[in-house]
Image (cartoon, grey):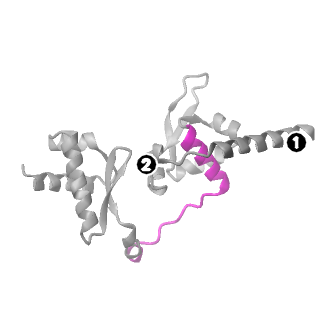
């Protein structure tokens, strides 16, 4: 096959699947190496960037997905009802941050860090498809382990959790000190 035929096939795969597709699966379907498949996907992605196209190809943790460019969103709204936007409260953001940076993590571990029950926040984040069950801890009761989803990566513009910003160590120490003072104040009362 010629390169154009491989590109057309990869384009068809990404379009038809809708969700992200792992590079290894694309390479297997095209019967080529992962390196060649990655080059083909990159060519397609570059073409979408350079042409006046409403589509783009994004990478999500070693997988690729075809999706609409943000610049075209207003036209989609004219056709479909505007999707309900999920509001991330401070409680949800705190819980999501803990999952993102500590994953895989159990509900009990999250509650230990937050100091309050977080069952509602976890349920809401699962409903919003920002976190999901990634396994079970090998411990009594086999508690559920939570991790982030591809939707989380899309929403926060990251290719993988490795792209998340690292907290400033000085600020972390400041937060720890404030938390310890707050715990001490509660104990004194």
Farthest residue to the left: give it: 1
Question: Could you say where residue 165 lies in the image, as x and y percent from the top left?
Answer: 53, 48
Residue 162 versus residue 82 in the image, above or below: above
Question: Upstream in the sequence, badge 1 or badge 2?
Answer: 2
* Magenta range: 77-102
Residue 99 versus residue 81 in the image, above or below: above
Q: Residues within 10 Å of mark 1 (few under 14, many from 20)?
A: few
Nearer to the camera, 155 or 158: 158
Residue picked out by circle 1: 185
Question: Could you say where residue 35 lies in the image, as x and y percent from the top left?
Answer: 21, 41
User: Which residue is pictured at 65% across the width and 48% down the height?
Assistant: 120
Q: Residues within 10 Å of mark 2 (few under 14, many from 20)?
A: many
From the image, give the main secondary structure of the stretch colored magenta. helix
Indicate left or right for 15 with 156 as reference.
left
Indicate left or right for 64 with 96 as reference.
left
User: Which residue is pictured at 31% across the width and 50% down the height?
Assistant: 64
Farthest residue to the right: give it: 189
State the CA–CA distance, disc 1 to disc 2.
Answer: 40 Å
Query: Any magenta on residue 61?
Result: no
User: Element type at marker 2?
Assistant: helix
Residue 93 versus residue 184 in the image, above or below: below
Query: Any magenta on residue 78?
Result: yes
Residue picked out by circle 2: 150
User: Which residue is pictured at 28% across the width and 52% down the height?
Assistant: 17
Residue 30 falls in which quadrant of the image?
A: top left
Give the foreground label among 1 and 2.
1
């Amino acid at each position: 096959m010629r390169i154009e035929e491989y590109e057309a096939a990869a384009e068809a795969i990404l379009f038809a699947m809708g969700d992200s597709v792992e590079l290894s699966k694309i390479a297997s379907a095209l019967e080529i190496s992962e390196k060649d498949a990655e080059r083909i996907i990159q060519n397609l992605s570059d073409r979408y960037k350079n042409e006046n196209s409403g589509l783009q190809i994004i990478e999500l943790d070693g997988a690729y997905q075809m999706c609409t460019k943000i610049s075209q969103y207003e036209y989609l709204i004219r056709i479909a009802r505007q999707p309900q936007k999920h509001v991330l409260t401070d409680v949800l953001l705190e819980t999501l941050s803990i999952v993102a940076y500590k994953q895989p993590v159990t509900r009990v571990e999250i509650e230990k860090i937050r100091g309050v029950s977080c069952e509602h926040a976890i349920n809401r984040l699962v409903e919003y498809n920002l976190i999901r069950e990634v396994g079970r801890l090998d411990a009594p009761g086999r508690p559920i382990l939570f991790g982030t989803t591809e939707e989380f990566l899309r929403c926060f513009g990251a290719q993988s959790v490795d792209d998340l910003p690292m907290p400033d160590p000085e600020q972390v120490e400041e937060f720890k000190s404030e938390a310890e003072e707050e715990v001490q104040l509660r104990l004194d009362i």
